[in-house]
């Protein structure tokens, strides 16, 4: 089984590998139900979805009638104003068939104008605080992509005491010295504040080539079992982070197998060899 650790100050013992439910964005309910069986097989107890993940919330909803108690359930919104965010949360609760989610996250805070709007009077932050006070959500988080995201998440933490963050983290991305420095500083701050750090794009191979539609991910994923295992083990080699799984159900089992077999982080020499062998490039430049 995949080990667990406290999800920051929430105290919930989440599996170190969290199911990234973007993988359910365009699957049938039958495919989703087979995915649930896989999650239960590996002991995954934390699901991370979003209102913007296609049909994902709708696919998870039927699971909740029987399995709500088995999962820490998280969703997200990209809405930036109070009323839009509030309305989308209510829609997410309906789609997920629950009265409360464990974690609601302000999603994809990449655009500086979006960031300003969300934290201004009448912004999404007000809806977040209200939802927590009303018991519709238990905890609050922030997420984002790209090289700018560590500084944006620092801004978020300067302005509200969120419970979790989510951002990219993999070997090739951390070869960018600026991103690596900012990630490490942010992770240190989260460690001191006891906030959960979720990471994404663990098995990214780089930007998707034009016309390549072999996988459901918006980026090009690694597909070789050896390379996936090394990439997953490298992320799990940082004891302070969680790894959110790949956005393609057909690669999910390989990721979970890798997480279950983790013992130690591969040395940089092996990771560098994989970069060269499989043509791995940074997803964000």
Image (cartoon, rainbow, N blue to C red):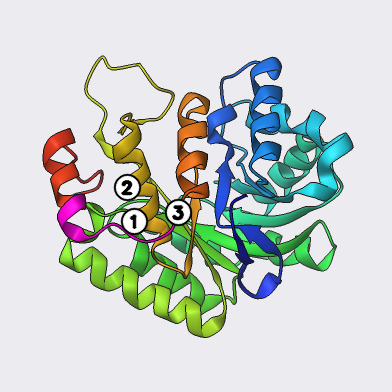
Mark 3 touches mark 2? (CB < 8 Å): no
Q: Give left or right: position of 93 versus 55.
A: right
Tell me how many marks there are: 3
Disc 3 target residue: 262
Which of pointers 1 and 3 indicates the residue nearer the eye? 3
User: What whole-number distance in Å separates the C-alpha atoms at marks 1 and 3?
Assistant: 9 Å
Sequence-wise, which precedes: disc 1 or disc 3? Answer: 1
Residue 205 in picture, x, y percent from top left? 26, 37
Mark 1 touches mark 2? (CB < 8 Å): yes
Q: In this view, does 12 lie above or below 168?
A: below
Q: What element carries label 1?
A: helix
Q: Give left or right: position of 47 versus 239.
A: right
Residue 82 in picture, x, y percent from top left? 66, 55
- Highlighted magenta segment, given as a residue range: 262-270
Q: Is residue 263 magenta?
A: yes
Disc 2 target residue: 230
Which residue is painted at 61% across and 72% down in the image? Answer: 8
Q: Is the magenta stretch mostly helix, strand or loop?
A: loop
Which residue is painted at 46% across and 34% down in the image? Answer: 254
Sequence-wise, which precedes: disc 3 or disc 2? Answer: 2
* Mark 1 crowdedness (10 Å alpha carbons): few <14, some 14-19, many ≥20: many
Disc 1 target residue: 234
Q: Can residue 79 be seen in this view?
A: no
**Closest to the observer, 82 or 73:** 73
Q: In this view, does 132 lie above or below 219?
A: below
């Amino acid at each position: 089984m995949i080990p667990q650790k406290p999800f920051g100050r929430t105290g919930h013992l989440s599996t170190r590998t969290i199911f990234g439910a973007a993988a359910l964005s365009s699957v049938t309910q039958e495919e989703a139900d087979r995915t649930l069986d896989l999650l239960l097989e590996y002991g995954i107890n934390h699901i991370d979805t979003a209102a913007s993940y296609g049909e994902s919330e709708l696919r998870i909803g039927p699971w909740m009638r029987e399995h709500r108690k088995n999962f820490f359930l998280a969703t997200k919104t990209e809405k930036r104003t109070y009323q839009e965010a509030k309305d989308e949360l209510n829609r997410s609760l309906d789609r997920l068939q629950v009265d409360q989610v464990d974690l609601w996250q302000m999603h994809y805070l990449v655009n500086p104008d979006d960031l300003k709007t969300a934290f201004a009077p009448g912004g999404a932050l007000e809806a977040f605080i209200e939802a927590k006070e009303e018991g519709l959500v238990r905890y609050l988080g922030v997420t984002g992509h790209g090289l700018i995201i560590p500084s944006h998440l620092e801004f978020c933490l300067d302005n509200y005491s969120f419970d979790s963050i989510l951002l990219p983290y993999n070997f090739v991305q951390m070869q960018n010295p600026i991103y690596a420095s900012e990630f490490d500083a942010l992770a240190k701050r989260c460690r001191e504040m006891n906030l959960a750090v979720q990471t994404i794009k663990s098995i990214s191979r780089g930007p998707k080539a034009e016309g390549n539609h072999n996988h459901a991910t918006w980026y090009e994923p690694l597909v070789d079992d050896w390379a996936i295992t090394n990439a997953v083990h490298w992320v799990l080699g940082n004891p302070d982070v969680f790894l959110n799984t790949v956005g393609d159900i057909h690669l999910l089992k390989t990721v979970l197998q890798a997480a279950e077999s983790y013992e130690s982080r591969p040395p940089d020499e092996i990771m560098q060899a994989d970069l060269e062998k499989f043509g791995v490039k940074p997803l964000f430049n």
